[in-house]
Structures are given as C-alpha cells and as structure tokens.
C-alpha cells in the first residue's frame, strides 16, 4: 500500500516498500500529483545549487587528499550515512518527481562518496584499533553500511520522502561536524583534512539552514525549528573545527612539535 500525504505547501511521499533486514532492501515510490513536485523560488534554487556546489568541493578535495596522503578524508560514520542518504534520495526522488536538481546533485554526490569509500577501504586499516584483529575491519565496515541504509530508510518511512530527508540530513550533518573534530583530535595532525573541506562543509550546510530553518522553504509550513536548531549547532561545531584546524596547520607550518593540541 502506498501512503501519500500532500498539502498545499508540502511534498511528502512514503515509499511503498518491503524492508527485509538482511541483504535486500526493496524500495518503490509513487508520486501523487504534478502539483506536489518541487517548485522553488529563484533564491531558493540558488541556495540549493550553492549547497550542492560546496558539498561537491568537499567531496572532490576529500578524494584528492585521500589519494595524495594515503588516507581517507571523511569520518567513516558520516561517510556511510551520506552514501545511504544520497543513493536513496537519487532513486526515490527521481521516481517521484523526475529529474529535478536535487536528483542530479544526489547522484553526483553518491558517485564521489563512492570514491571516498574506496579510499577508506584501501587506507583505513591503519586507523583500526591495534587491539582488534584486522579481519574485523571489514565486518565492522559492512555492518556500518547496513546500519546506515536501514536507518536512513526508517526516516523515509516515518516522515516521508521530502521531510524525512531533511531531518536525516541535518542530524547526520550535525554528527559529521562533531566527528570531524574527533578525527582531528584522534589523528593529532591535519592529515586528510583541509580548510577547503572545512569551510565548504560549513557553507554547504549554512545554505539549507537558511532555506529550511529561516525561510521555511517552498514545501515547509514556515521555518522549521528542528532544522534551524540543528543547523545552528552545525555552524557552531564547524567553526570550532575550522579554528582548531587553523591552529594545527599553523603549528605544522612553523615546524612545531604538537604534543598537547589545545
């Protein structure tokens, strides 16, 4: 059965799906009416496109650093949540609304994140705890991917395609902001990290925060408090991370030995 909800200003689609916990996830989705398809104002389109551009820069520089420094440049749990979000959004929104801007952006992000995931599997074992056998690296990674796909799918079941993706995106973005700080502290250096990634990640999140948390978006009944609060905390932790990364890069440039980070 397809459950669809659409009001004057909102676009919600719950997927018609059978979720099998194991190794298969059967998803189908059906749009209701053409009037439910996204119809953004020019400024809203700018914010969407600007966010897409910034996040694309994040992924491209993560790929560059990953191969250059033999590392992976995005916290792993943030990475798997991103990949699950992007694949599901690209497929489901295409089925619901056709080839709209966000579908193209999600598809590009998924492909770029796939390359970052490759750098994780290729170089990530050196960060795996020494007190665990190395074969658990693959088991843990697959479990994380499976968890991410099911969790993201649960958001769509509970909140619908449009609202569910916004809530999950901002919550995983907040998690990513904190995880970047953790990665910087755990590595004790700027390895696999750059100001390009840090600033682009911040701006790429700030734009949709303004769109959905301040303006309300074309399909929101006014500004969304949850998105606004999550977006504000994303900016807070992103700016803390930028400040920390600036200090560490400054110390590395001066050739100082970093004993105590802060």
Image (cartoon, helix red, strand yellow):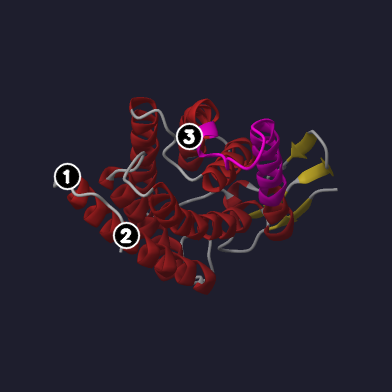
Residue on which the image places disc 2: 260
Q: Is residue 236 left or right of residue 159?
A: left
Residue 38, horizontal then vertical, whole percent? 52, 50
Residue 138 placement: quadrant: top right
For disc 3, the marked residue is 104
Q: Quadrant of the C terminus?
A: bottom left
- Number of other residues with Cα within 10 Å of mark 3, as a class: few under 14, some 14 to 19, many 20 or more: some
Q: Is residue 139 visible?
A: yes
SS for tag 3? Answer: helix
The stretch of residues the image draws in magenta is: 125-152
Could you tell me which residue is drawn at 51 percent across and 58 percent down?
Answer: 175
Point 38% across, 25% down: residue: 67
Pointer 2 or 1: first along the chain? 1
Does residue 42 appear in this view?
no
The residue lying toward the viewer, choosing from 162 and 87, is 87
Q: Is residue 95 above or below residue 33?
A: above
Instruction: Tell whether 126 sits left or right of 162.
Output: left
Residue 77 lies, in percent from the top left, at 57, 47
Q: Which quadrant of the structure image shows residue 92?
A: top right
Mark 1 crowdedness (10 Å alpha carbons): few <14, some 14-19, many ≥20: few
Residue under numbered circle 1: 255
Q: In front here: 52 or 200? A: 200
Tell me the number on the disc at residue 51: none
Image coordinates of residue 247 in percent, x first then y, are: 23, 56
């Amino acid at each position: 059965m397809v459950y669809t909800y659409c009001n004057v200003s909102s676009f919600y689609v719950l997927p018609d799906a059978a979720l099998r916990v194991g190794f298969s996830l059967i998803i189908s989705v059906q749009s209701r009416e053409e009037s439910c398809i996204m119809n953004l104002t020019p400024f809203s389109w700018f914010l969407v496109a600007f966010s897409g551009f910034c996040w694309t820069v994040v992924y491209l520089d993560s790929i560059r650093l990953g191969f250059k420094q033999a590392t992976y440049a995005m916290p792993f749990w943030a990475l798997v949540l991103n990949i699950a979000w992007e694949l599901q959004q690209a497929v489901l929104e295409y089925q619901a609304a056709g080839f709209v801007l966000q579908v193209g952006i999600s598809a590009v992000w998924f492909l770029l994140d796939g390359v970052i995931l490759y750098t994780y599997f290729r170089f990530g074992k050196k960060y795996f705890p020494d007190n665990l056998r190395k074969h658990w690296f693959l088991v843990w990674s697959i479990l994380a991917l499976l968890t991410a796909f099911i969790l993201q799918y649960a958001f769509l079941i509970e909140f619908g395609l449009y609202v569910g993706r916004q809530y999950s995106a901002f919550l995983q973005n907040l998690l990513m902001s904190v995880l970047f700080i953790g990665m910087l502290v755990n590595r004790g250096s700027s390895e696999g990290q750059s100001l390009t990634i840090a600033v682009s990640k911040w701006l790429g999140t700030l734009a949709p925060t303004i769109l959905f948390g301040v303006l309300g978006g074309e399909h929101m009944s006014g500004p969304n408090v949850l998105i606004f609060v999550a977006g504000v905390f994303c900016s807070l932790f992103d700016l803390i991370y930028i400040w920390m990364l600036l200090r560490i890069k400054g110390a590395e440039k001066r050739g100082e030995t970093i004993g105590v980070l802060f």
